[in-house]
């Protein structure tokens, strides 16, 4: 996984007004917490943070006020619902060698069997435990040749060394549906309603 260095400043002003001023300067308010320490309120550079967050579970090496260096991973990111710019970020303090629980994106490769089937992502991200400095960016699952009724379970997904599942082995991650199957229940409901009215 990639490690990104970002300079941050501690902040002492809080509230909506202070947050707006920070954003006007192309910066983002954030909070660093974890390991039982008091939350540390930070101001982070907007553009650098935006680029870093393009990588899921990116490891951020924070240089705080030029005095302290800490490692963190993004825990919660708030964006403007219309414009998409960053409004606030919560960062979780981590240590090298520490195991952390995160969700990693599930990507697919290959083609379903012919027949107009639909692929449903039951889980878009897979909950796993990994060492803080070796969190996988994603996992890729082959759906080659799968047909209606087939599914991919959590235990079927090959994880990188040192990464373990934090969900039940038999959790369904992907399943293949028949395009016609979705229309059938509506027809049945209609028939039931007509029978009830009769």
Image (cartoon, grey):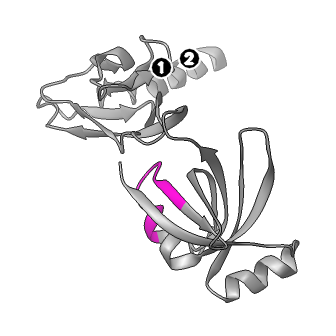
Q: Which segment is the magenta one? A: 51-61
Q: Which residue is mark 1?
A: 188
x and y percent of residue 113 in the render?
13, 28
Q: Work out which quarter of the rendered image holds the C terminus and state it.
A: top right
Would residue 20 appear left or right of 63 to someone viewing this image? right
What residue is shown at x 56% (from left), y 17% (from top)?
192
Residue 80 in view in this figure: no
* Image quadrant in which you'd find residue 46: bottom right
Would residue 192 appear left or right of 144 to someone viewing this image? right
Confirm or deny contact between disc 1 and disc 2 (CB under 8 A). Answer: yes
Residue 71 painted magenta: no
x and y percent of residue 95 in the render?
56, 41
Would residue 196 appear left or right of 138 to someone viewing this image? right
Residue 95 in view in this figure: yes
Q: Is residue 187 above or below residue 69?
A: above
* Image quadrant in which you'd find residue 16: bottom right
SS of the residue under disc 1:
helix
Q: Which residue is mark 2?
A: 192
Q: Is residue 83 above or below residue 90?
A: below
Mark 1 to mark 2 CA distance (whole Å): 6 Å
Q: Nearer the viewer, residue 122 or 90?
A: 90
SS of the residue under disc 2:
helix
């Amino acid at each position: 996984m990639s490690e990104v260095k970002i300079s941050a400043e501690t902040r002492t002003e809080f509230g909506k007004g202070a947050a707006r001023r920070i954003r006007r300067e192309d910066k983002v308010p954030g909070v660093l917490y974890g390991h039982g320490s008091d939350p540390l309120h930070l101001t982070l550079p907007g553009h650098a943070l935006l680029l870093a967050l393009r990588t899921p579970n990116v490891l951020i090496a924070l240089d705080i006020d030029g005095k302290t260096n800490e490692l963190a991973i993004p825990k919660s990111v708030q964006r403007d619902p219309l414009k998409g710019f960053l409004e606030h970020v919560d960062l979780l303090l981590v240590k090298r060698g520490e195991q952390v629980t995160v969700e990693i994106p599930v990507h697919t490769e290959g083609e379903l069997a012919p027949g107009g089937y639909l692929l449903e992502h039951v889980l878009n991200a897979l909950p796993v435990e990994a060492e803080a400095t070796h969190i996988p960016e994603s996992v890729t699952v082959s759906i080659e040749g799968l047909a209606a009724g087939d599914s991919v379970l959590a235990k079927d997904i090959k994880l990188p060394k040192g990464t373990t599942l934090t969900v039940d082995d038999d959790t369904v991650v992907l399943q293949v549906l028949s395009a016609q199957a979705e229309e059938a229940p509506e027809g049945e409901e209609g028939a039931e309603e007509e029978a009830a009215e009769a």
